[in-house]
Amino acid sequence: MTPLPVAETPVTGPQASGLRRAVLALDQGSQSSRACIIDQDRSVLAEAQVPIQTLRGAGGEIEHDAEEIIASLRSAATMAIAQARRREPGLLLTAAGLATQRATLVCFDRAGEALSAAISWQDRRNAAWLASFGAHAERVRALTGLPLSPHYGVGKMHWCLQQLPAVQQAQRLGTLQIAPLSAWLVARLTGGAARVDPSNASRTLLWDSSTYDWSAELLALFGIDPAWLPACSATRADYGTLRLDAADEGIALRAVTGDQAAIPFALGAPDSRAIYINLGTGAFIQRPLTLRPADPAPLLGSVLALEQGTSGTLGTAWYCLEGSVNGAGSAIEAFASQQRVDPAALWPQLEQLPDTLPLPLYVNGIGGLGSPYWRAAQPSYFIGEGSLLERFAAVVESIVVLLAINFDCMRRWGDEPARVLVSGGLSRSDWLCRRLAACLDVPVLRTAQEATVLGVAALAAPQLLGPAASPSPQRFEPQRSSAAARDAITARRVRLEQRLRDSA
């Protein structure tokens, strides 16, 4: 396997004088905006993180203030750059990359003013409207690789068109733009036109992953005017120059992608023998592919990256099979909120639990059931009794079980997976990683927590970033758990999987 092809560009001017060079990696997520300065050794020279609010409505709406997102990104980037240059006064920032939460949507006018909130990927508003297209679900999946899910953008687009007067006014004036969050951020951070990358465009249910463009058929089906949408671009392209503040000299924005799509590039070229799991607010499991999966069901056929071809055409692509567990960090937060406990105090206590302890089961429907079930609504509840710690362990184990179900679906494509690479905040738990290795029966390697920013930095400046640093990721072998413990985990998985099937 090789990475996407990159044209070699000679280094001249200040870059050739021995100055230390680095990349600005921006990661805009559900809970915060983060900026990291990544050097040629893939080391994080500096980082800054600015939290953002999540606004929740009585009807289950989940959104963010779009202007707060812009301000938080600028603030995080400015702080990270200042921190890095205090350490390295002559530091040269050669490029920037941007990764965003996918399927989050913003409506705005052509001047860049937001006309809506940033409606979160977690938001399922307009689910009933989208369900009315059920007869077209197979065709939608054939074109996009995705199921007909309210988590994706088109249902949110239709809701905005029907419910928001500012959007309706812009529509009448011919100034309306509706786009994934990434495209709006590109416009606002560079002052240029909105442009959308493949990873984020594909999460609208309007993008054809075989032609790398908006689908005329799907636009007509859902009643979306193509004039409202931004132009499609390659993952690596000249997106413009970041203007973070009045004194900033500008940094070329060279790559834009989705937060999860960046992860397989964090350690070099994506590996089709590996499964990548990122454990954040949701948990996402991916298997890279060099060919577009013709029938990914019940998983997703996602786009990792698309390279610019010759003469301005779009060319080589990396695809992946992807599964999602909607309730990962959000399930932990929901449990902690209901029980009025601090999860930080519970994580280390998990190590005290015997591996063979008969835990209760937790049916994890936080945020709805993702793959392979695709149920927008699923009640969450415990089966069996247990202490506070045992019920917390059951919530964590439910994430492991849902990942294992997706892992088994991925085994049908290509060779048997040789290992699993995990990243994200929840991967800090040894208990979770051991459970995952025991449940999957393959080695689990805990990689850098900064997988998203390392991946987007590698996409933005592939000639600058060398191979991944040599220290080996921490490895969790299935055999570290006793045979009795593995049998107990397997038995609970079988019971939980049966309950999920029966509740369909």
Image: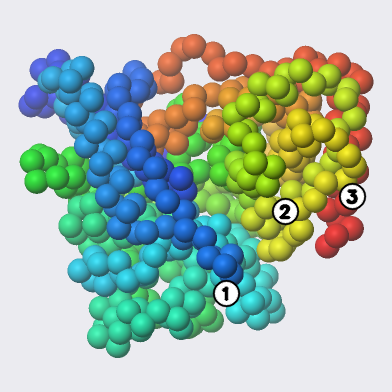
Decide: few, some or many residues near mark 1? Use Cα within 10 Å; few <14, some 14-19, many ≥20: some
Q: Name the residue: 41% across, 61% down.
A: 118
Tell which of 41 and 378 is nearer to you.
378
Q: Name the residue: 43% across, 69% down.
A: 214
Q: Secondary structure at mark 1?
A: loop
CB under 8 Å between discs 2 and 1: no
> Real-space Cα distance between discs 3 and 1?
30 Å
Residue farthest along the front direction in this orientation: 340
Q: Secondary structure at mark 3?
A: helix
Q: Which mark is residue 202?
A: none
Is 310 left, or right, of 421 in this rendering? left
Tell which of 398 and 252 is nearer to you.
398
Q: Earlier in the sequence, mark 3 or mark 2?
A: 2
Decide: few, some or many residues near mark 3? Use Cα within 10 Å; few <14, some 14-19, many ≥20: few
| Mark 3 vs mark 1: in front | 1
Is 42 left, or right, of 266 in this rendering? left
Q: Point out residue 266 in the picture as x, y percentages from the top left corner.
A: 45, 30
Q: Amino acid at mark 1?
A: Asn
